[in-house]
Image (cartoon, rainbow, N blue to C red):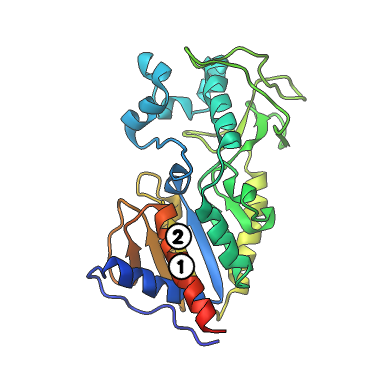
Amino acid sequence: MSKPTGEAFPADPESPNMCISTAAKVISSADALWIGAGAGMGVDSGLPDFRGDHGFWEAYPPLQRVGLTFYDMANPRSFRDDPARAWGFYGHRLQLYRDTRPHPGFRTLHSWCHQLGKRSFVFTSNVDGHFQAAGFSELEIFECHGTIHQLQCSDACQAVTWSCDNMQIEIEMKTLRAVSPLPRCPSCHAIARPNILMFQDGEWLSHRARQQLDRYEQWLVDLAGTSLAVIEIGAGTAVPTVRMEAERLAALPGATLIRINPRDCESRDGILAIEQRASDALHHLDRSVQQLANGAR
């Protein structure tokens, strides 16, 4: 197949319709799709936006009352200093992720990968498990910051994680504190914690993510000589892991970066910038992708 991707697009932003049309052509003609998703992907499903203390406290008023920030809670020391509070926060997040249905954009991406026969891989900093819930295989996902759906020992006594699918945490919402028996390590009986990479986290057990990374790196090796659509969605600059990887891949021969974000969506050479929410942009892109597919029949 010819490799139309990797073109140098002008820095001046195109009209929204033109940009959607160009991006749809890149997606349709590419041999493979790289899907990079940050927090903005989940926000459109109704998940809270933790950008800045204001957004965090709007989602969790009990923590504002005691002056605790996202940085304070997303820190392994919270499970040592106040495990009931830590599990109040993470237990609430776990149930929220379970109860929230991934928005239709997830199914759109899945259809591009599988119905159009594209080789694909998901690279996400989100810990919610929504790509798996939308039908993506565990074998085609790299969760670079871990997952809330696996637990580990807070003391990292062994390199073992386990599922929390059957776990329920009772929470007193007025104080956001867990009131049920807290989960514990089956080996040493220390408090368990989610297998999520937190701030200043020397105890995170990375072996599960390492296995995902190995599969991801092999996928990249197998892509040699093919065209790649790099689709970056809702990945900002505050935690730039996904954005940095997208820009690294965009420098490969035959790769084109499509950046979807209502904020921090600068347009420059080599980037197709779509300044829209994830669900809106994917809906508009899919209409153009389907039109191209129908026209090719």
Q: Of the numbered discs in the image, which one, if any, rests on residue 287? A: 1
Indicate the quadrant where residue 206 lies. Answer: top right
Name of the residue lying farthest toward the left? 12
Q: Looking at the picture, which amino acid does disc 1 mark?
A: Arg
Percent of width and height locating residue 181: 68, 14
Q: Quadrant of the N terminus?
A: bottom right
Q: Of the numbered discs in the image, which one, if any, rests on residue 161? A: none
Q: Taking 76 as reference, is 130 above or below it?
A: below
Left or right of residue 18: residue 49: right
Q: Of the numbered discs in the image, which one, if any, rests on residue 283? A: 2
Residue beneath the point at 34% across and 62% down = 274
Q: Quadrant of the C terminus?
A: bottom right
Element at label 1: helix
Residue beneath the point at 35% across and 32% down = 55
Percent of width and height locating residue 291: 48, 75
Q: Looking at the picture, which amino acid does disc 2 mark?
A: His
Q: Taking 210 as reference, is 195 above or below it?
A: above
Percent of width and height locating residue 73: 47, 25
Per the model, the C-alpha gap separating discs 2 and 1 is 7 Å
Name of the residue lying farthest toward the bottom? 2
Is residue 120 visible to the viewer in this orientation of the structure? no
Left or right of residue 168: residue 293: left
Residue beneath the point at 55% across and 38% down = 100
Percent of width and height locating residue 150: 66, 36
* Discs 2, 1 touching: Cβ within 8 Å: yes
Residue beneath the point at 58% across and 25% down = 91
